[in-house]
């Protein structure tokens, strides 16, 4: 399982801090929704594609995959707009959505997961005042990332065991007969992991000097 | 919140992600994915608070660029799309299911569990998803309701019953939600 949509390259876009890229994305979204005219939206679309393909040197396949993912949906949307409104509104809506989807894909493909996690921890820092510990956000993300392949592996093992006993492992019935033992197994596993973390002092991350320990 | 709660939260974010790898069952033109099963289970097994946080964490995994949506989708792009409302509704859906489950906990059974998963996992999801679809896509309400809700509801009902059945069985062998103090006192 490939665990990231990140495409490594040495480009100015890749080097731009993640926080700035996310701000730029928010700005672009505000622009195309507040000024939905054909020149603005077309200009934004061309700029985003140029930024992704020329400046960041992303493979065409990356943007192509995102476009394909929304293509049938955009087509249906355009057809509905032809019936309900007019060609101009339909074109604008479709191009606007495509621009935002591609811009977000460029940000995702040029930013490492670790950089995104760092941004999230930074954004959450003010939440310390209500008892959230930003350092723990990195910890839960890391735990979830480790659990995903583990769950798939355990599910595969349970299915094999049931198939060996002649049980049904396909379709909806198979889904529920697999999920109950799987859930009990992984709940016990999560409990064990948390005990191991506590034993190694995961609970001792200071909130802030002299601050309350509750979170 | 204890480390155990953090581990459960991470676990159910991961379960929703892993269910995205289960191939969609195609019923006519309508794809039925297993992923909302994860949302329902998070609320029904962890309860309101941890269920909410686990699905919020799942959205964070999507946003930081992990391909955890069906068909390897993910990244910030999905929050710009017309289906963003459905995704955003997931933590709230898990919260509502968790709230109802905690209320039903002492006399929890398949019927009550199904009420919780239908209200939280279907009503809440469409109450948020359909208006966003209508606004982002510029669709009139009637069309959004038909293409964004009605065709998926039969599949969702099946998932709600499956999630409820699983939650009842898991509660029997590994209950995670604490029994309310009042019930213990009565005993």
Image (spheres, coloured by chain):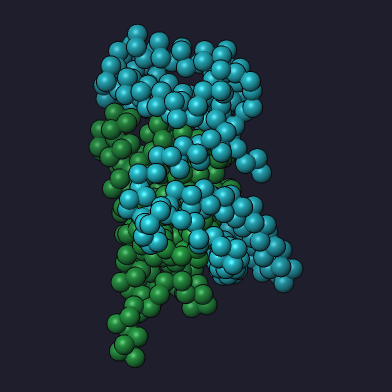
Q: Inspect this view and state whether residue A146 appears.
A: yes
A131 over A3 or under it: above or below? below
Q: Quadrant of the C terminus of chain A?
A: bottom left
Q: Residue furthest top?
A: A39
At 64% across and 56% down in the image, what residue appears? A150
At 49% across and 68% down in the image, what residue appears? B166
Colour of chain B in the rendered structure image: green
**Foreground pick, A110 / B168:** A110
At 62% across and 57% down in the image, what residue appears? A151
Q: Residue furthest right?
A: A164
B158 over B132 or under it: above or below? below
Q: Quadrant of the N terminus of chain A?
A: top right
Q: Viewed as shown, does residue A89 lie left or right of B35? A: left
Colour of chain A in the rendered structure image: cyan
Residue A171 percent coordinates (x, y): 58, 58
Q: Residue furthest front?
A: A210
At 57% across and 54% down in the image, what residue appears? A143
A146 over A108 or under it: above or below? below
Q: In which quadrant of the rendered view does residue B112 lie?
A: bottom left
B109 over A100 or under it: above or below? below
Q: Viewed as shown, does residue A171 lie left or right of B52? A: right
Residue A48 percent coordinates (x, y): 47, 17
**Foreground pick, A152 / A55:** A55
Q: In which quadrant of the rendered view does residue A26 lie?
A: top left
Residue B23 percent coordinates (x, y): 58, 48
User: Looking at the image, how many numbered discs can be counted on the residues?
Assistant: 0
Q: Inspect this view and state whether residue B16 appears.
A: no
Residue A52 percent coordinates (x, y): 54, 18
Q: Viewed as shown, does residue A30 lie left or right of B6? A: left
């Amino acid at each position: 399982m490939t665990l990231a949509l990140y495409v490594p390259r040495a480009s100015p876009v890749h080097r731009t801090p993640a926080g700035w890229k996310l701000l730029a994305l928010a700005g672009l979204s505000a622009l195309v929704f507040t000024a939905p005219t054909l020149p603005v939206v077309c200009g934004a679309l061309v700029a985003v594609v140029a930024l992704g393909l020329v400046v960041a040197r992303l493979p065409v396949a990356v943007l192509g995959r995102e476009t394909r993912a929304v293509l049938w949906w955009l087509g249906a949307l355009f057809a509905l707009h032809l019936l309900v409104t007019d060609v101009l509104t339909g074109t604008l809506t479709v191009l606007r959505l495509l621009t935002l989807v591609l811009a977000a894909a460029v940000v995702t493909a040029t930013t490492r997961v670790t950089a995104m996690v760092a941004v999230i921890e930074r954004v959450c820092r003010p939440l310390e005042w209500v008892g959230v510990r930003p350092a723990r956000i990195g910890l839960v993300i890391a735990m979830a990332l480790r659990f995903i392949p583990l769950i798939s592996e355990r599910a595969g093992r349970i299915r094999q065991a049931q198939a060996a006993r002649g049980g049904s492992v396909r379709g909806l019935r198979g889904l529920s007969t697999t999920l109950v033992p799987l859930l009990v197994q992984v709940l016990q596993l999560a409990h064990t992991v948390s005990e191991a973390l506590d034993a190694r002092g995961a609970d001792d991350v200071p909130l802030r000097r002299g601050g309350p320990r509750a979170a | 919140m204890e480390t155990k709660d953090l581990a459960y939260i991470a676990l159910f974010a991961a379960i929703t992600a892993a269910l995205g790898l289960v191939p969609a069952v195609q019923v006519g033109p309508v794809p039925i994915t297993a992923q909302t099963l994860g949302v329902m289970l998070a609320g029904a097994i962890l309860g309101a608070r941890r269920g909410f946080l686990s699905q919020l964490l799942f959205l964070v995994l999507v946003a930081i660029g992990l391909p955890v949506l069906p068909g390897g989708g993910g990244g910030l792009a999905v929050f710009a799309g017309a289906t963003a409302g459905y995704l955003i509704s997931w933590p709230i859906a898990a919260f509502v299911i968790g709230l109802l489950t905690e209320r039903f906990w002492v006399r929890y059974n398949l019927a009550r569990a199904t009420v919780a998963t239908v209200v939280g996992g279907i009503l809440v999801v469409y109450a948020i998803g359909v208006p966003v679809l209508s606004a982002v896509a510029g669709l009139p309400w009637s069309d959004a309701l038909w293409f964004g809700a009605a065709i998926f509801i039969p599949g969702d009902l099946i998932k709600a019953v499956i999630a409820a059945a699983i939650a009842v069985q898991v509660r029997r062998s590994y209950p995670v939600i604490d029994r309310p103090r009042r019930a213990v006192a009565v005993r």
